C-alpha cells in the first residue's frame, strides 16, 4: 500500500531540508574560507565575527559565535514576526539557530582539510559559497536573518529600499575591522561581499522582474493564463502587422522572473504563433503583486 504525502507536508519537508543544507554550507564556509582569510562577511554575521575576534584579542574572552549571533538577531526577529510573517520568521529562525550551532560545533574533520593561505582565493570562493547558502535559504522562502529582516520590513511596511543603509552599516563594520586588525583583511572582505552579490544576482532571480511583450491572436486566452498563473495583470494594445496588414493584439505585462520559463511554455501551447519579447525590468514603480510572506 502506497502512502500519499499531502502537498503541504511535502512542501514543509522541502523547506526544512533546504534550510538544513543552507545552514551546513554557511557554517562550513565560515569555518574554512572566512576564518582562513580572516574575512568579515556582511550583515550581522560579519558583526558577530568582528565582536568575537575583538573580545578574544583584547580581553582573551572566547565568546561562542552562536551567542553573539542570536543576541544581535533578537530585535530583527521580533520585528519580522510581528510585521512580515510568522512562518517566514520561524523558518528563518531555524536557519539562524542551525548555522550558529554548526559554526561552533562543526567537527574539525570537515574543516581542517580546507584551510587556504591565499586570502584572494578565500575571498572569491568564500563569497561563492556564501551566495549558495543564501540561495538555498531563499528557495525555502526564508532568510539568513539579520539585516535581511530589516530590508524586507522597510520594503513591505514603508515601500523604501533599505539596502543603502545596510551597505553603509557594512562599511562601518569593515572600517572597524581595518582599524582593529588589518587593512588588507578589510579590503579582501569587500571582494568577498562583492562576489556574494554578483553570484546572487546571477544565480537567483526570485526578487527580479521581467517585462513580457506578447503579440498574439489569442489575447483573451493568453491574458487569462497570465492572470491565473502569476496573479499579475496585462494591458492590451491594438496594432497592425505590417507584413500581412492584419490586426494584432500586443499584451504588455510585468511578472516575476521565476515565472517566465513556465509561463512562456504555456503561452506557446495556447498560441503557437505568438511572438514574445522578454525584457529585463531594471526598476519598477507602481502596484506590483508580491506573494505575502507566510
Image (cartoon, grey):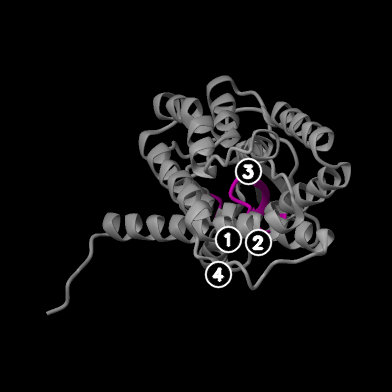
Label 4 to label 1: alpha-carbon separation: 8 Å
Label 1 to label 2: alpha-carbon separation: 6 Å
Magenta-drawn segment = 202-220
Tags 4 and 1 in contact by the CB under 8 Å rule?
yes
Task: Tell me the tag on residue 110.
Answer: 4
Q: In which quarter of the image is residue 36?
A: bottom right
Which callout, 3 or 2, points to the residue nearer the camera? 2
Label 3 to label 1: alpha-carbon separation: 38 Å
Q: Which of marks 3 and 4 is nearer the N terminus?
A: 4
Pointer 1 local density, CA inside 10 Å: few below 14, some 14–19, many at least 20: many
Q: Position of residue 199 (x, y in %)?
A: 72, 56
Please give the name of the residue rendered at 51% of the width and 32% of the height, measured from the top-left corner: 73
Please give the name of the residue rendered at 55% of the width and 70% of the height, measured from the top-left corner: 110
Q: Position of residue 75 (x, y in %)?
A: 48, 25
Label 3 to label 2: alpha-carbon separation: 41 Å
Q: Name the residue under label 1.
A: 28
Task: Tell me the tag on residue 254.
Answer: 3
Label 3 to label 4: alpha-carbon separation: 45 Å
Q: Name the residue under label 2.
A: 32
Q: Which of marks 3 and 1 is nearer the N terminus?
A: 1
Helix, strand, or loop for circle 1? helix
Tags 2 and 4 in contact by the CB under 8 Å rule?
no
Tell me the quarter of the image containing the C terminus: top left
Helix, strand, or loop for circle 3? strand
Amino acid at each position: 500500500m502506497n502512502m500519499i504525502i499531502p502537498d503541504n507536508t511535502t512542501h514543509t519537508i522541502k523547506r526544512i531540508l533546504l534550510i538544513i543544507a543552507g545552514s551546513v554550507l554557511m557554517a562550513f564556509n565560515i569555518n574554512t574560507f572566512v576564518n582562513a582569510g580572516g574575512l568579515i562577511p556582511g550583515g550581522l554575521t560579519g558583526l558577530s565575527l568582528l565582536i568575537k575576534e575583538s573580545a578574544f584579542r583584547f580581553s582573551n574572552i572566547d565568546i561562542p559565535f552562536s551567542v553573539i549571533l542570536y543576541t544581535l538577531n533578537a530585535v530583527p526577529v521580533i520585528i519580522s514576526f510581528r510585521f512580515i510573517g510568522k512562518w517566514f520568521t520561524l523558518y528563518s529562525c531555524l536557519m539562524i539557530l542551525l548555522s550558529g550551532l554548526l559554526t561552533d560545533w562543526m567537527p574539525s574533520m570537515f574543516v581542517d582539510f580546507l584551510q587556504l593561505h591565499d586570502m584572494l582565493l578565500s575571498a572569491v570562493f568564500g563569497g561563492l559559497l556564501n551566495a549558495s547558502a543564501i540561495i538555498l535559504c531563499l528557495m525555502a522562502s526564508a532568510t539568513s536573518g539579520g539585516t535581511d529582516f530589516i530590508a524586507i520590513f522597510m520594503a513591505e511596511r514603508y515601500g523604501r529600499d533599505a539596502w543603502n543603509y545596510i551597505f553603509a552599516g557594512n562599511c562601518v563594520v569593515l572600517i572597524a575591522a581595518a582599524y582593529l586588525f588589518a587593512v588588507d583583511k578589510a579590503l579582501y572582505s569587500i571582494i568577498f561581499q562583492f562576489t556574494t552579490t554578483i553570484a546572487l544576482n546571477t544565480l537567483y532571480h526570485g526578487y527580479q522582474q521581467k517585462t513580457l511583450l506578447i503579440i498574439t491572436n489569442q489575447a483573451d486566452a493568453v491574458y487569462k493564463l497570465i492572470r491565473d498563473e502569476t496573479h499579475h495583470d496585462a494591458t492590451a494594445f491594438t496594432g497592425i502587422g505590417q507584413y500581412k496588414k492584419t490586426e494584432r493584439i500586443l499584451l504588455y505585462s510585468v511578472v516575476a522572473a521565476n515565472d517566465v520559463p513556465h509561463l512562456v511554455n504555456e503561452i506557446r501551447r495556447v498560441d503557437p504563433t505568438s511572438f514574445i519579447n522578454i525584457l529585463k525590468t531594471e526598476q519598477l514603480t507602481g502596484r506590483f503583486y508580491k506573494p505575502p510572506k507566510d
